[in-house]
Image (cartoon, rainbow, N blue to C red):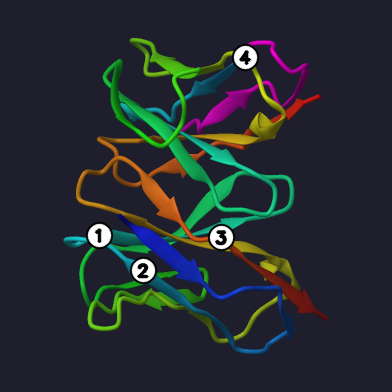
Amino acid sequence: ETGVTQSPTHLIKTRGQQVTLRCSSQSGHNTVSWYQQALGQGPQFIFQYYREEENGRGNFPPRFSGLQFPNYSSELNVNALELDDSALYLCASSLDGHEQYFGPGTRLTVT
Amino acid sequence: GNSVTQMEGPVTLSEEAFLTINCTYTATGYPSLFWYVQYPGEGLQLLLKATKADDKGSNKGFEATYRKETTSFHLEKGSVQVSDSAVYFCALMGTGRRALTFGSGTRLQVQP
């Protein structure tokens, strides 16, 4: 059974640029949730995708957007990057949203 | 809204000591409760869970009991090892099964 994978592992971007992060869900899972974890803090919920539709959103602006594909993999897109967007971005997959299993994360640095 | 409060760290223990990490929550309805562990440079691993009052979750020697009367889900382990050094997060999920709400994390350092 393949676990949750994310790419890339690390990324450095400049303020104002756009970034796309990718996540492959665990086999048998149909739901992907994205979280932002700032240094020294707990993860904060960005949004969730269930069967290719957004199924809930946290307190993040519209420049954070996402997609889920028919194979249940997902992308997180962030436009107009700000310095405060520097964080570890975690993807979690689950069956119908309950027990969420996390990937290793993508470390984004905005300079 | 939902919230989780954890004891602040770091918690520093000697090997084989008893561990307690306190966690209390605020939520409407009947949330599910989780403990996740994060090792340096890695993502979060699900450690244990409980889905209803008085349930006890357990895994790898760690235990936590869902106490609705005190809105708590304290993590315990009878004898810690150096390899248990990590950051531990308490989390809840409301009945909507969408977002996990996390505490701020407690760093555990176990010395040999």
Residue drawn 45% across the image and 42% down it: A101
Mark nearer the viewer, 1 or 2: 2
**At label 2, which amino acid type do we have?**
Tyr
Mark 4 chain: A
Q: Secondary structure at mark 1?
A: loop
Q: Position of residue A63 (x, y in %)?
A: 50, 17
Residue drawn 62% across the image and 37% down it: A104
- Any magenta on residue A2? yes
Q: Is residue A74 visible?
A: no
Q: Is residue A78 visible?
A: yes
- Any magenta on residue A63? no
Mark nearer the viewer, 3 or 1: 3
Mark 3 chain: B
Q: Which residue is mark 2?
A: B25
In primary-sequence order, the first of circles 1 and 2 is 2
Mark 2 chain: B
Answer yes or no: are tags 1 and 2 on the same subunit. Answer: yes
Q: Position of residue B12 (x, y in %)?
A: 74, 80
For the residues labelled 3 and 1, the Cα–Cα distance comes to 18 Å
Mark nearer the viewer, 4 or 3: 4
Residue drawn 51% across the image and 71% down it: B6
Q: Secondary structure at mark 4?
A: loop
Residue drawn 38% across the image and 11% down it: A69
Classify mark 4: residues with Cα within 10 Å, few (<14), some (14-19) or many (20+). few
Magenta residue span? A1-19
In primary-sequence order, the first of circles 3 and 1 is 1
Query: Does B85 appear above or below B77?
Result: above
Q: Which residue is mark 3?
A: B104
